[in-house]
Amino acid sequence: MTAPLVELQDVARIYRMGDTEVRALDGVSLRLEAGETTAIMGASGSGKSTMMNLLGCLDRPTSGRYLLEGQEVSRLGNDELAAIRNRTIGFVFQSFNLLSRTSALENVELPMLYSNVSSADRHRRAHEALAQVGLDGRADHHPSQMSGGQQQRVAIARALVNQPRILLADEPTGNLDSRTSQEVMALFQGLGRGGITVILVTHESDIAAYADRVITMRDGKIRGDERQSARRATGTLAAGEASP
């Protein structure tokens, strides 16, 4: 039987604040296959952000095992985890996290600065990533010259430029209007169909409806795990067309 891309085995994450013990994750087991688009939902304090940090190798479990592509990564050193984050995982955030004084192309090139990629290859791959999200014609624009939807597309291109297996998105539509949110989620659906595993944290059921699977968390545990027919993408842009 082929190992899943992501597997958590009885994972706990405990924080101690003085004499108080907080079980942010409490015995979580989970398997995610390549190409799945999964939404993680839950109220504040449910454990969804802690799970995202663990899946992104930004934190380590207190107990249990995290296997990524069949390799246990929960006990790797910091340098090894940094290499996995750069090579295997792309991150997309609610606030875009773009550098305001650099162009879209330069923002997308940033992850490659740590990968010993030549300048010519950086330019080529960054242009390809921008074309993949429909923004190749905006390569020289700065964030202030772009709409929120365009900025999020630049952030997605930056996350894709090192060709990751997994894309982690934390409230990726939180700062976008409804139409632009639909366009961004259609883009994520397309990436999933292309084989990228998309994992997103959201509190919006309308956004979770685009996922193949919805995991609901409460009190550090998985309380629901539902597979669904993802909403048919609407508002998809043709390649090269700029979003509003």
Image (cartoon, rainbow, N blue to C red):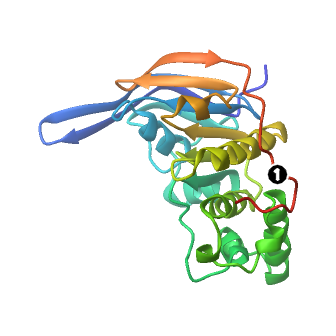
* Residue nearest the viewer, comparing 209 with 57: 209
> Tag count in the figure?
1
Drawn side of residue 191 relative to residue 44, left or right? right
Drawn side of residue 183 relative to residue 43, left or right? right
* Residue nearest the viewer, comparing 65 with 125: 125
**Quadrant in which the N terminus is drawn:** top right
Q: Amino acid at mark 1?
A: Leu
Residue 121 versus residue 11 in the image, above or below: below
**Label 1's element?**
loop
Asked whether residue 196 appears in the rendered view, the answer is: no
Residue displayed at 66% across by 68% down:
111
Residue displayed at 48% across by 45% down:
53
Asked whether residue 148 appears in the rendered view, the answer is: yes
Mark 1 lies on residue: 237
Residue 110 x %, y %: 65, 73
Residue 194 versus residue 6 in the image, above or below: below
